[in-house]
Amino acid sequence: MATPNTPLWEVFIRSRNGLAHKHCGSLHASDATMALQAARDIYTRRGEGLSIWVVPSNAITASDPSEKGMMFEPAESKIYRHPTFYDVPDEVGHM
Amino acid sequence: MAAPSIKVSETPLVLYALRRADDALILGHRLSEWCGHAPALEEDMALANIALDLLGQARTLYSYAAEVEGKGNDEDKFAYLRDVRQYRNLLLAEQPNSDFAHTLVRQFFYSAFADLYWRAMMQSRNPTLAAIAAKSEKESAYHLRHSSEWVIRLGDGTEESHRRTQAAIDDLWAFTGEMFEVDEAERGLIDAGIAVDPATLKPHWLKTVAGIAAEATLALPKSDWMQQGGRHGRHSEHLGHLLSELQSMQRTFPGAAW
Amino acid sequence: MYTQALNTSDGDDRNIEDAARAAAFQARVDAEERIEPNDWMPAAYRKTLTRQISQHAHSEIVGMLPEGNWITRAPSLRRKVALLAKVQDECGHGLYLYAAAETLGTSREELVDAMLAGKAKYSSIFNYPTLTWADIGTIGWLVDGAAIMNQIPLCRCSYGPYARAMIRVCKEESFHQRQGFEIMLKLSRGTDDQKAMAQDALNRWWWPVLMMFGPPDKVSQHSDTSTKWRIKRFSNDELRQKFVDATVPQAHFLGLTIPDPGMKQDEAGRWIHSPIDWNEFNQVLAGNGPCNRDRMAARRKAHDEGAWVREAAAAYAEKRARRQTAQAAE
């Protein structure tokens, strides 16, 4: 019996006063409180953080130019194609 | 030929520092046993962070004890060359990790106390101890938050996690009383404004613990019978095995530098 | 070394893909542009990177075990703290790398399941036991030394998330190798027992470390696309030779003997080692090293025994979400 996948969160850290938050990676946590704690434990161990933002990865909308110099429709997408970002109806089974 | 144990001049201030140092070392050592084996990688990081904080506290306190004692001892002599009967940690700290619930409940009980204790110690008339307290309090505040969140999730998670966490509370409850004990050696320091009377912290500690337990849908035991002895070197059987492992290199290779 | 067990033929040439897009992709790579998660990429690029990055991640996590074996017995508080911090760093590196691998479309759970099922590999070196404290020094000095040699070029690899993860890793790596070397230095200036301990550790770890760099170039078949796609910047033999040339003088400084009586210096000053026993390497990769079973058992145990904890966290999150929805409705 497989545990459901633990949700994925993207982490943004403001490391010094005056700077903007910078994306530094992702982590798995069951809820926002645990995500913040995990972000502190993983990404600010060497005193790197004044302020931490955690965002569920699938809540982020992205617009990425796919090829430089080629025409593109500014399409809204997810930040990457993660298997948990797309809901599959239960009847379809494990995918 | 094995390295024999050192002798320690346990004047009140030395004894005081050794007690807190031993708490931090033994608890930190226990947490370090999880390294590479935690339920999730994120938790491996968290437990290691807490362990590192505690080991750091231990080292500072041992160094202070050595300075006060003035007999040429140091952090490693205290940690590696005192036997079970010379160790002064709380019984709670040496209890085995058992499962994740036991580890987190043990951490919760201890951190709820340590957070209050170090905050009060920031007013110590002893500037060194006050400074140690200021640093340790920040760390304990985070340890308390982390372990509280886990106790809530384990208590109010699944049936299995609830059962295991209730069992952990029932198993560890009898070790919580020792945190609030005072003896003659410490009474003098308390009267001099150097140490804090831990008994005064008990009501607040109970309130914190009861609040989290309620949110976690867990029950606190009614019994008020408490285990004692760690502060005086009368430990559980667990400490001997722990120290065998911790001290093995220094005992086997007397006088070597690492 | 994270590609030790990557097989050949990803079949990229046989895929029917837009030739123009593939050419545009290659032009970007050649121009040292970074490929990001939502950019078009050949299916084979995605596949090979997913394998390489995840195997690198698995290696960091399994690598916690041989060193973690000595945390409770570290011979001084300073060493204890340093070793715990180092092993924790490795856990963190594994986390950064899983995060990078996930941007390619496979979940961490799936990657870890593949490792626990024995389907995905990790670096061969971690299938050897740490028998003495000197092993800890040797691992820091040699294994981390070898890893650094591989990781610095990866900071410029073509895939953005992997390159950025490697930059983070390299920044933290600086104290690992120094710590290991310092341990060896202390031993080499210590008692006769300590000197013997150091030499014994080097004797046991030298050849497995050389094998870390993977099979010789003439045998290794997968390198072409990895090089073309700037995932692999130096060949196995190049890195191995670089490592040997850097390390032999260090061993001499420590007063230690490299366990290779046939090793000689050539006219260019390079240290030419004797032939490696690739039989041992193949056996270890196939699961028949001293510790493969123990390593896998330890990771499976952690995973299995942690299941109830992960389930509890998920159950609580669901309850909390339902309560919040119910409250909002009031």
Image: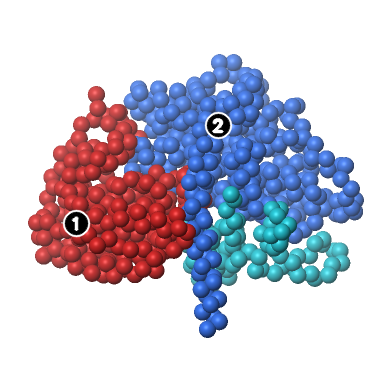
Chain colours: A cyan, B red, C blue
Disc 1: CA contacts within 10 A as few (<14), some (14-19) or many (>=20): few
Question: Which residue corresponds to the image point at 27% horizontal and 60% vertical from the top-left?
Answer: B221
Q: State the residue in front, C226 or B43.
A: B43
Disc 2: CA contacts within 10 A as few (<14), some (14-19) or many (>=20): some
Quadrant holding the C terminus of chain B: top left
Q: Quadrant of residue C186?
A: top left
Label 2 SS: helix
Question: Which residue corresponds to the image point at 11% horizontal and 60% vertical from the top-left?
Answer: B187
Question: Which residue corresponds to the image point at 87% horizontal and 54% vertical from the top-left?
Answer: C21
Q: Looking at the picture, how far across and down is residue C114, in whole percent?
A: 64, 43
**In which chain is the residue bearing label 2?**
C
Label 1 SS: loop
Give residue B20's mark: none
Q: Looking at the picture, how far across and down is residue B167, in whole percent?
A: 35, 54
**Residue C27 sits above or below residue B151 on the image:** above
Q: Are marks 1 and 2 in contact (CB under 8 Å)?
A: no
Residue at mark 2: C292
Name the amino acid, label 1.
Answer: Trp
Please state if B89 lies on the left or on the right of C149 as rendered: left
Q: State the residue in front, B116 or C326.
A: C326
Q: Looking at the picture, how far across and down is residue C14, in whole percent?
A: 88, 42
Q: Tell us which disc is closer to us: 1 or 2.
A: 1
Residue at mark 1: B225
Please state if C95 lies on the left or on the right of C267 as rendered: left
Quadrant holding the N terminus of chain B: top left
Q: Looking at the picture, how far across and down is residue C47, in whole percent?
A: 74, 46
